[in-house]
Amino acid sequence: MKFTSIRLKGLYTIDLPISNIRATDPYLLKSAEGLGPPEVNVFISTTTNMDGYYKGRQAQYREIVLNIGLNPNYQNDITISDLRTELYGLLSPLASDSFDIFILNNDVELMQVQGYIKKFEIMPFTAEPEVQLTISCLKASFESPNTIFVETISDTYQEVLNLGTAEAGLILEIEFQSECTNFTISDSRGNTMVINHDFFELDILNIDTRPGNRSITLQRDNTIESIIYSLSMQSEWLWLYGGLNVITTPNTEFAWRTLSYIPQYWGI
């Protein structure tokens, strides 16, 4: 992925250019770690006299380390201390303890991740003053700032091209055209969700499979209620994997309202 700068949005907005650097830029990015794929825990079970058995994997949360040079402008009365103070705003943003890290290309925000300052080293007595930020992130992947809405063509068979490089959750909204007692939907790897519920005509079902946002709600007569309790015990949450995905359902009593996702990226 082509990118030209990193942006930190906390109490203040800090831009760290990578190309087209100007002599007047207050911050200079000297090095950055943790912008690629994070380490992944792979779970393999041993078996007697046989090969190992793959049980799954889980990506560790992302940790980013930035070395930032401070470039004061004494002509405009901007000192090294002023620049450090502005960076301290990442430790205490207004809304919460977290701040956002953006990857940009020519001032266009391509992807982002939310993080917390784990370590803040100021190194004030070096010949070229700088700070080192260690940032613990809430997710393993970066996330696009834009939601992708998929054009739905078929009710029972729907292709979805994942524009990201990492797995992403689905956000879908359907409207029932007649009564039915359950709704079943599957992804490309056979993960299947079975929702056992009495649906009426004009009911609107919303399913969000994104980790941290997972929900199943039913809108009926301007009333919205959670029906996540209707999800069968054998169900698995749906995912979009890399490349072209296929979403299928045996149900025919519904029509798509929206089908969308937010692309996820393993790194730059």
Image (cartoon, rainbow, N blue to C red):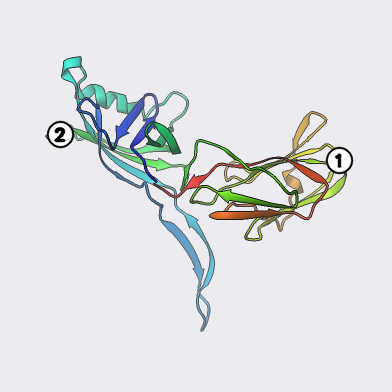
Image position of 196 (left or right of 124):
right
For disc 2, the marked residue is 128
Q: Is residue 74 above or below residue 6?
A: above
Residue 236: percent from left, percent from top = 66, 55
- Who is closer to the viewer here, 142 or 223? 142
Residue at figure coordinates x 33%, y 36% from the top left: 5
Residue drawn at x 81%, y 50% is 252
Going by the image, does 163 lie left or right of 158?
left
Residue 177: in sight, yes or no? yes
Mark 2: which secondary structure? loop
Q: Give the residue type at disc 1.
A: Phe
Q: Is residue 215 visible?
A: no
Q: Position of residue 37 (x, y in %)?
A: 41, 52
Q: Nearer the viewer, residue 105 or 143?
A: 105
Q: Earlier in the sequence, mark 1 or mark 2?
A: 2
Q: Secondary structure under badge 1?
A: loop
Q: Nearer the viewer, residue 147 or 223?
A: 147
